[in-house]
Amino acid sequence: MSQPNPEIPMLNVQIDGTWHQFPKGTRVIEACRQAGKFIPHYCYHPRLSSPGNCRMCMVEMGMPRMTPDRKPVLGQDGRPEIAWMPRAQISCAQDVAEGMGVRTDSPMVRECRTGVMEFLLINHPLDCPICDQAGECRLQEFSVEFGRGGSRFLDEKVKKPKNVTLGPRVKLDDERCILCSRCIRFMKEVAKDDVLGFVDRGSFSTLTCHPDRMLDSNYSLNTVDLCPVGALTSSDFRFKMRVWFLKETRSICTGCATGCNTVIGSREHKLYRQTPRENDAVNQSWMCDAGRLDFQGIDSLARLAAPRMTVDGDRTTADWTEAIAAASEKLRGVAAGQLALIASARMTNEELFLASKLVRSLGVASEHVDVLPRTGEADGILLSADRNPNTRGALLAGIASSVPGSNLPAIAEGIRSGRIKGLLVLRENPADCGIPETDLAKLEAFVAVEMLDFSPLKHAHVVLPSAAFAEKRGSMVNGKGRLQRLNRAVNPPGLARDDWEILRDLLAAVDPATPAFPQIEDVFHDMAATIPAFAGLSLGKIGDAGLALNQP
Amino acid sequence: MPHIIPRPKLTFAEKMYLPAILGGLVITLRHFLRSLFGQTRITLQYPEQKWDENLPAHYRGAPTLVKDEWDRERCVACQLCEFICPPRAITITPGELPADSRWAKVEKYPEQFEIDMTRCIYCGMCEEVCPEQAIFLRKDYAITGLSRAEMVYDKKKLYEIGGVMDGLVNKWNDLK
Amino acid sequence: MDIWIYAIVSLVKTLTIIFVVVLPMVSYTVYAERRVSAFIQDRVGPNRVGIPLTLFGFKEDVKFHGLFQPFADALKLLLKEDFTPAHVNKFYYWLAPALAMIPSLLVLAVIPFGSTLDLDFLVTPVAKMLGFDFGLGPIPMVIADVDIGVLFIFAITSLGVYGITLAGWSSNSKYPFLGGIRSCSQMISYELAMGLSVVPVFLVVGTLNLSQIVEFQCANGWLVLPVWFHGLDWKQVALWVPLLISFVVFLIASFAETNRLPFDLPEAETELVGGYHTEYSSMKFALFFLGEYSAMIAASSVIVTLFLGGWHFPGIPDGSAGWFWGLANVVTFFAKVACVLFFFIWIRWTLPRFRYDQLMKIGWIYLFEIALVNILLTAGLLVAFS
Ligand code: SF4
Ligand code: SF4
Ligand code: SF4
Ligand code: SF4
Ligand code: FES
């Protein structure tokens, strides 16, 4: 909770008989929430404007009773007496006022809610068995709490379009829409792409897209999260799994340097969806579609499931002990000055830290170490120009050169000329780093830690299969210098392992003098002692919301 | 307030236990003799004698899937039965009905629907929870197999045992 | 008689008793238990196992009312996995089943299960063919006709508790342990009452030798039923009262000694899973089972011998009247034992289990005192009559 700003006056408000203080400008619905009184609502969203069109948030309100000379009448407790308004008011579009009284659970309020629920359900199709929202549907929840058991509506229900394709990633079922306009406001106010709107009137009001447009914004899937009912559904998640089966893991998105906070939904070690998690310091309540669907590659057929070695020109799968031993032997077989290491700014701090230890143990020259930069265009909303999630971490670990990627041409050139004879690639495709396959074939030692099998890897002497972002633990530093945590939602396939474990074992094989790191917490501990920016921190201290590092 | 049940006062004869014991012995002996001479016949000699025609309508045998009178598979893969099933005998892979299907309006159907009969405890929860009246416990009780895999019944087999069930759900026909 | 012949005859008697009489009897007591309990509870019980003729290509199996069930049971017990948990004390764990089984078999050594059997009509021709010329004469139908028969029985049965206690202790698991403790205190408590309750018998009969006790009953009528012949003598009627009390106390104590319901607390399934043998399986478990049932048979034999006239039945002469009658005596004895066994089973399926404190109370406060007073009563009567 933020500190009260002394410039904003505090107002006294009575909520269900108890007096509280709120800064001026607080919405009544928000004040009630802070006082521990939940008010059901559909259209209100703290980050959007309040049109007040669903009428679910009704409460009884009152203002102090005034004497003829405009002084409040004080009751026996010295507090103003409240003159209640005869009819219930919506609480989402009203700010608190001095001496205001609110009743959130009076008989009148309850009757209003029941009435609103009954109206909302008049034309509702009750698709719950096939509706993806079921289980996290506000309409279901409030029906249980405030609804009537049965329907009194005898007429034919209004029929509206079902299964409409609004955009490449979003489907609309107009019958389920309760016309709360959250989606419209989001597209207009947050995504700055005003493509949605209502047409027709009364019972026939229908949500639709601008005739010449599609809902194809990179933020379109947020409307699916926002929609309190199952009217908007994600084409990707649609009909895949019921939400109540999903195990929720708090993690972060690794699509760009913003590092949006996420919740990963998985069941029985299969990923089903990723949704944004609220964090004011990072992504508010949103995330972009590209990042959200980033998990799809994880199930890909190209995943490496077992360590692979090339022995006398034959590729064979191996067990971990063999593979790690072979990798270390290969790397040590090359003179220190002829080694290069390419890491990835998609790796976690722990992995990068272990990689930096490896650089030291193998004696790789600092101009032979770098990461691959990825840039795009920032969209001014969330998406950052730096598409690597952990460039800052790579800089802190000393793996990235001060201008990330500036060493890569020299490394590529060294390999072509034969000056560099050994290459260790961590989580990058050498082809992207400007090293053609023909050059890779010349290497005396080529070891790769990778999750997907791509063509340049066929030249690798040892390939160590590693884990995707949803399969590992660790931390990253986002573009604004905020340290955040990744968490494991599912297990890596087959024999594949968490990258930090692979690097730890490789390090131990290369340099038997390295301390043992039984757990990732131990790696972080060592890292905190080495890198000043992390001093005094631990994985546990980071917390679900992450924390800003002192260093810029 | 405590509710006190006073211990009954026993007479001397009762305290001796013996009369009660003798009474008990007489009762058991009577049962013994009646069974011995074939006057009591309760047990059915199962494989030879069966009671199938007397099974009540609510008998809970194998859970099966049913189709409606228009040959539509009733199940819409809502996965509620999968959720409610206490021993987790049910596994469903939901899917989307193709747009050209006669029942495209229903949108969702189970691509795969498996019940592991070795796990099922015939509790009937699935039948009770199903919003589409698509799963019913039929009267088949002799469910055996030679391997575990054989005891996992797939959709085809479940429809085979289940057959057709009329009436009830009208949501997906055009009356609605 | 030659000592060797004596030894051989004893061996033959022992083996016959154990393998021809007791073990089949145990198996069939189990069968009877299951059938009788089924009948009492309006069920059917095991009625299927017979000769599996269909295995040999016949149309139908022969069922015999399930009379072959014991064979199936034995086979099953033998073939089950003999599992020894890791946390047990191996030595005692292995020893316990044997200790539970042996005492009840030993008891049978002193029980006279018949009068005499003159097999010379068989033995002499065979011996002649082999070139010898001798007869065995009438063979006493008791393995060891010792003068301290009854004391021997008490001495041996009290060993049975070691098996159970050791099983409970060595299993190193809570239920067996509780079972072991319970049986230990139960046996000790009831042994006292049991021992005291037979003293009146000795006072009346004047010997500890079981064969002589049976002979006394042949002459004077069974101890619990002295009325049958020689007319009725009022002294006898007066003595009948303490002997009847003796009988009842002894009977109750034998139930407790054999851990039968209503005193089966050591293995109370509802409370202790299986009691002291919870951790046992396969043949070790079977040994406990055998021990329990042979203890039951031994107890029945003792009851029959002491109170129910042993092998004697009015109208059937003893073995000196010919081998046929000798055999008839043996049959009579086992028929009586079977009746007592039935009684055991009948009681089990009628009465509920006692609570532990009740069990102890009955043992120490009632049975023990009753037995004690009964001795004085008998002694008083005997003094008055002499
Ligand atoms: S929107 Fe909610 S109430 Fe409507 S069908 Fe979907 S789950 Fe059911
Ligand atoms: S589609 Fe959903 S969010 Fe949009 S107006 Fe309808 S109910 Fe509201
Ligand atoms: S009957 Fe019960 S156990 Fe069997 S499938 Fe249905 S819910 Fe599961
Ligand atoms: S509850 Fe009924 S409709 Fe839902 S998945 Fe099970 S069988 Fe299908
Ligand atoms: S939440 Fe207030 S009117 Fe919708």
Image (cartoon, coloured by chain):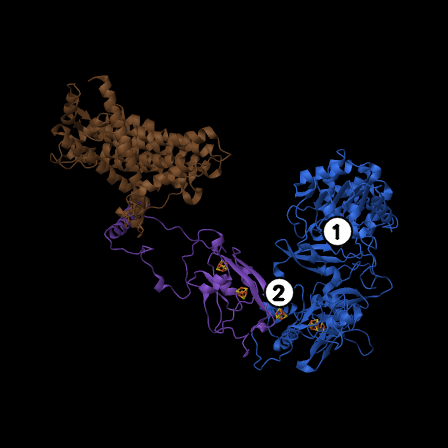
Residue B165, x across and y down, in percent: 46, 70
Q: Which residue is mark 1?
A: A485
Q: Residue at x 74, y 63 (%)?
A: A289
Which quadrant holds residue C102? Answer: top left
> On the image, numbered disc 2 is attached to which residue?
A239
Amino acid type at image mark 2: Phe
Q: Residues within 10 Å of mark 1 (few under 14, many from 20)?
A: many
Which hue is chain C drawn in?
Answer: brown
Does A107 sit left or right of C309 as displayed?
Answer: right
N-terminal of the two: label 1 or label 2? 2
| Mark 1 close to ligand 2, CB under 8 Å | no
Image location of residue B50, percent across then percent down? 33, 59
Residue C375 in view, yes or no: no
Q: Nearer the viewer, residue A246 or A135?
A: A246
Using the numbered discs, state the Cα–Cα distance from disc 1 to disc 2 in whole angstroms: 30 Å
Residue B161: x and y, percent? Answer: 44, 63
